[in-house]
Image (cartoon, helix red, strand yellow):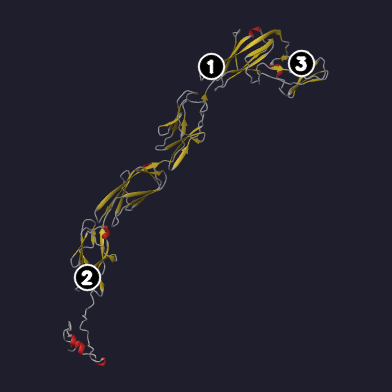
């Protein structure tokens, strides 16, 4: 058996008996070398497959697409490629038994891209050209964004006078057309997804709408946005009641007056944020501050501040005048003493000065009443130049406040010694003789105001002849009846004083003889 010639059919097998293979062994030099290997099959190269589609532009969710892979080769396997990656099959895809027909039953936007088919055998692979599937979709739901501005619920707040940009966001292919509609239904001649408004005013307040249309899918959607224009805030004003405020009378309402709407309100007390309490409550969106049971220290000052995210303004401070009193009435003696007196002992014909005082706003009105006299004395001070028996008894001071309608009393008991005082009344240019007894017994000298106007307290001195200086230790004056008290006058010699005169730093000396 020799090798087959080139015109014969290839051998499909050789049957030799075991004995022949064992017995017929040629030397190595005499081995038969066949021209061709009868076991190798001759195969032509694979042809490039072709790809086609039933349609290359479709609308999402409405249509299906079929791809065909054409090849003349047999005994090949068809593989599909999407976007240069092996195609991942899903429930929306259908593949024929020979793999040459791929059907997308319901097209979606993620199916858009390039497709290829490949023919494989055991030795090589051939790829088709690519074909592109375009899927039209949208517009999807619309979202309108803005800058600058702040969302407040379903409303967008923008600041008056600012420049605001609105931009529509949606998914759509191909790009849609945009039609903007102003609050007054005016349609803007624009097809851009962005709308810019320079210098926003109150006229722009309302609902902005944008109609988004896809001419390929024939779908349209309408987006809407409600815009609120916030004004630049001006200074508010704190208003208080016009009537007189009285302690422990209330409640009292303070109002933050403003023409602006939709603002936040913050109150300040003494430049510190006011914290509501049982006595301080807020009403009407914090526009009203209620002060319960008014106190004298509730004078403030009070301020209110209005604000929104883009602006704030604070009022001028407002102080309250709280009327109160009079509180406890005290009677003191003299001009500078603060000791409260209850009983006074004085000699007949001596002088007496009483003061009546009480905490009150406004200043209390004072009236003096003597037990044995029908005369009513008006004023804070009661000056008695010479005590008589009519002055003895209860002396009362009444303090009253016409705004609070409160009246309070205090009294002192005056006891008059029947022994006459040695005090002397002086008139201008009236000669008088002072003795050591007069001086060291602290006698009181009284003179009309016209005379004493030439004497200046704490800057006056007295001189006596012959050359005996006399120095004031205490000099007291009243505006109505001027009273001079000479106390503990110092003498250089123990002798009688012949002549004395007052000397003022501002006035001419006046001589007493």
- x and y percentages locating residue 275 in the rendered image: 47, 34
Pointer 2 with pointer 3, Cβ within 8 A: no
Residue 334 falls left or right of residue 180:
right
Alpha-carbon neighbours of circle 1 within 10 Å: few (<14), some, or many (≥20)? Answer: some
Residue 18 falls left or right of residue 461:
left
Give the residue number, with chain letter if any, for mark 1.
407
Point out the frontmost of discs 1 and 2: 2
- x and y percentages locating residue 320 in the rendered image: 51, 28
Q: Which mark is residue 390?
A: none
* Near-viewer residue (91 or 500): 91
Residue 3 seen in render:
no
> Mark 1 and mark 2: span between their CA atoms?
118 Å
Where, quadrant-wise, is the N terminus in this rendering?
bottom left
Pointer 1 with pointer 3, Cβ within 8 A: no
Residue 31 seen in render:
yes
- x and y percentages locating residue 309 in the rendered image: 43, 42
On screen, residue 308 above or below 85: above
Point out the frontmost of discs 2 and 3: 2
Point out the frontmost of discs 1 and 3: 3
Q: Which mark is residue 440?
A: 3
Sequence order check, earlier mark of 1 and 2: 2
Give the residue number, with chain letter if any, for mark 2.
77
Sequence order check, earlier mark of 1 and 3: 1
Where residue 329 sits, quadrant-wise, is top right
> Mark 2 and mark 3: span between their CA atoms?
145 Å
Residue at x 43%, y 43% (from the top left corner): 310
Sequence order check, earlier mark of 2 and 3: 2
On screen, residue 71 above or below 198: below
> Mark 1 and mark 3: span between their CA atoms?
43 Å
* Near-viewer residue (396 or 35): 35
* Near-viewer residue (180 or 408): 408
């Amino acid at each position: 058996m020799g090798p087959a010639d080139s015109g014969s059919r290839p051998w499909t097998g050789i049957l030799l008996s075991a004995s022949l293979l064992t017995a017929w062994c040629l030397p190595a030099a005499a081995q038969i070398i066949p021209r061709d290997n009868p076991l190798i099959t001759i195969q032509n190269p694979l042809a490039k497959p072709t790809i086609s589609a039933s349609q290359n532009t479709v609308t999402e969710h409405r249509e299906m697409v079929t791809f065909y892979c054409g090849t003349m080769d047999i005994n090949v396997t068809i593989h599909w490629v999407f976007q240069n990656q092996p195609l991942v099959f899903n429930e929306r895809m259908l593949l024929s038994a020979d793999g040459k027909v791929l059907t997308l039953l319901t097209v979606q936007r993620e199916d858009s891209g390039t497709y290829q088919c490949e023919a494989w055998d055991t030795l090589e692979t051939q790829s088709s050209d690519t074909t592109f599937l375009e899927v039209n979709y949208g517009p999807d739901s619309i979202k309108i964004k803005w800058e600058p501005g702040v969302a407040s619920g379903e409303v967008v707040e923008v600041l008056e006078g600012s420049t605001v940009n609105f931009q529509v966001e949606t998914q759509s292919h191909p790009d849609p057309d945009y039609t903007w509609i102003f609050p007054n239904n005016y349609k803007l001649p624009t097809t851009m997804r962005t709308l810019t408004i320079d210098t926003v005013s109150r006229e722009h307040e309302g609902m902005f709408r944008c109609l988004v249309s896809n001419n390929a899918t024939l779908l349209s959607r309408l987006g809407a946005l409600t815009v609120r224009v916030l004004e630049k805030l001006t200074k508010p004003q704190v208003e208080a009641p016009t009537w007189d405020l009285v302690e422990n009378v209330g409640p009292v309402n303070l109002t933050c007056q403003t023409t602006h709407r939709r603002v936040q309100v913050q109150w300040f007390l003494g430049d510190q944020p006011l914290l509501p309490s049982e006595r301080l409550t807020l009403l009407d969106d914090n526009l009203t501050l209620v002060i319960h049971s008014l106190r004298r220290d509730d004078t403030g000052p009070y301020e209110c501040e209005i604000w929104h995210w883009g602006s704030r303004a604070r009022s001028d401070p407002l102080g309250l005048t709280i009327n109160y009193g009079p509180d406890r009435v005290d009677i003191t003696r003299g001009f500078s003493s603060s000791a409260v007196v209850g009983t006074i002992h004085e000699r007949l014909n001596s002088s007496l000065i009483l003061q009546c005082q009480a905490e009150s706003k406004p200043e209390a009105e004072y009236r003096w009443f003597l037990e044995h006299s029908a005369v009513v004395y008006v004023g804070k001070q009661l000056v008695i130049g010479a005590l008589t028996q009519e002055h003895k008894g209860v002396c009362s001071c009444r303090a009253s406040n016409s705004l609070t309608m409160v009246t309070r009393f205090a009294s002192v008991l005056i006891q008059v010694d029947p022994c006459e005082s040695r005090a002397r009344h002086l008139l201008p240019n009236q000669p008088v003789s002072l003795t050591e007894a007069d001086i060291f017994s602290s006698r009181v000298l009284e003179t009309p105001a016209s005379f004493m106007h030439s004497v200046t307290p704490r800057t006056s001195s007295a001189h006596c002849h012959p050359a005996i200086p006399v120095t004031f230790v205490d000099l007291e004056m009243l505006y109505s009846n001027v009273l001079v008290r000479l106390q503990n006058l110092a003498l250089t010699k123990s002798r009688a004083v012949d002549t004395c005169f007052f000397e003022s730093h501002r006035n001419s000396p006046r001589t007493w003889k």
